[in-house]
Image (cartoon, rainbow, N blue to C red):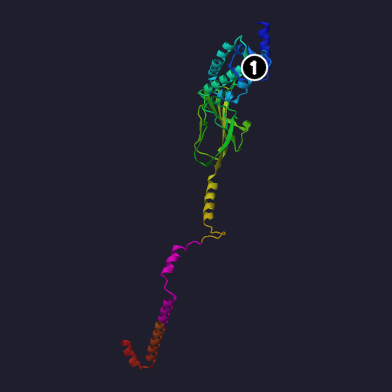
Amino acid sequence: MSATSALWRLCVSLLFSTSLSCYQCLDDLNLGLRLCWGHMLTEQGIRNVGACFRKLDRIFNNNERVIEAGRVGKGYDKQLKELLEAEILPMAEEFDKKENDETVYEERLQTAADNFIAAASKLPRVSGCFPPCGFQSAGAVFNCVTCHYDSCEFPLDCPVKEMKAKENKRIQMWCNVPFHLPVDMEVIWRFAEEVNTQQVDQFNEVTAGMDRLYSIPSTSLQHQGTYQCEIYSGRRSIVRLYFYLAVTPQVVEGHSELQEIFDLSLLPGGRLVPSPPPLPHLLLLLLLPSPLLLTACITALLLLLFLSLGILYRSLKTRQSSPPEQVDEDEDL
């Protein structure tokens, strides 16, 4: 390596020493040196390589349109490199060891950036990230500023999902996520009794395997608490889901139903709805006569009683006043 080449490399490294850039990620440093060799300042009439690299930095590295066009799916960063080289390589071969005015560089580099943006924007985009939780490697996008893929920056722990079940009833919990899961995944179910928590140290392992369904055939009060489903791939944790199960006892359930019936029976203002009379009383009311008719019947009975008493009294009086023979005849009669 010559002293001049080493000096150029040192200048380039100083220009881009703060961080990586889209141009450095996608293009070769030697290509940039060949491109900027003959960069001439118009007013001073001198060759200035540093000014050329500052143009590259402004047009490619600090251009939001270039950065956005480079946000492609996994595996397409190589095609980004090929697209950039297709724009820069012809210029480097044309400008190599030749002096050119800085206005020519400005125009040609801006055209190259526009062509790169148009071509890179047609490459496949990723399906995106699915909030709110989980390590989603499939949703990673390429970042040409850092030369790495940015994964979805979501926490591993999902929010707690609350579930309710009646005692002695069946309940099921599914460990499902909206993003793609690897084939070699492993599912571990854990349980923290009675509490609603996401503290990992409060859980005890229940099952481990491939089953993402956890089923309780008949719930009881001892099943109340938080269930954690953690999905692994290799040694990496992908996501942790939480389910808080509240179990309602049957006695409490019966009391609740009675309370609902009582609430429905109340009129506005807290007054009870009058209940209808029992059926036997209702029939009795229908069969009883009116008061006027009842009075007439009682009066007729009393008159009949008085007439009977009068006839009986007169008969006794007649017997006492008649002679004995007549009484015997009357008795015979």
Crowd tier of the residue under label 1, counting other residues whose Cα lies within 10 Å: few below 14, some 14–19, many 20 or above? many
Q: Position of residue 106 (x, y in %)?
A: 61, 19
Q: Position of residue 24 (x, y in %)?
A: 61, 17
Residue 145 makes an appearance in the image: no
In-front residue for pair 331/299: 299
In-front residue for pair 71/244: 71
Outermost residue toward the top in this view: 2
- Horizontal side of 267 relative to 284 (left or right) equals right
In the image, residue 166 lies in the stretch drawn in magenta: no
Which residue is under mark 1?
A: 53
- Quadrant for residue 26, please give it: top right
Q: Amino acid at mark 1?
A: Phe
Q: Secondary structure at mark 1?
A: helix
The quadrant of the image that shows the N terminus is top right
Region rendered in magenta: 274-302
Q: Position of residue 116 (x, y in %)?
A: 55, 20
Q: Would you say the magenta stretch is mainly helix, strand or loop?
A: helix
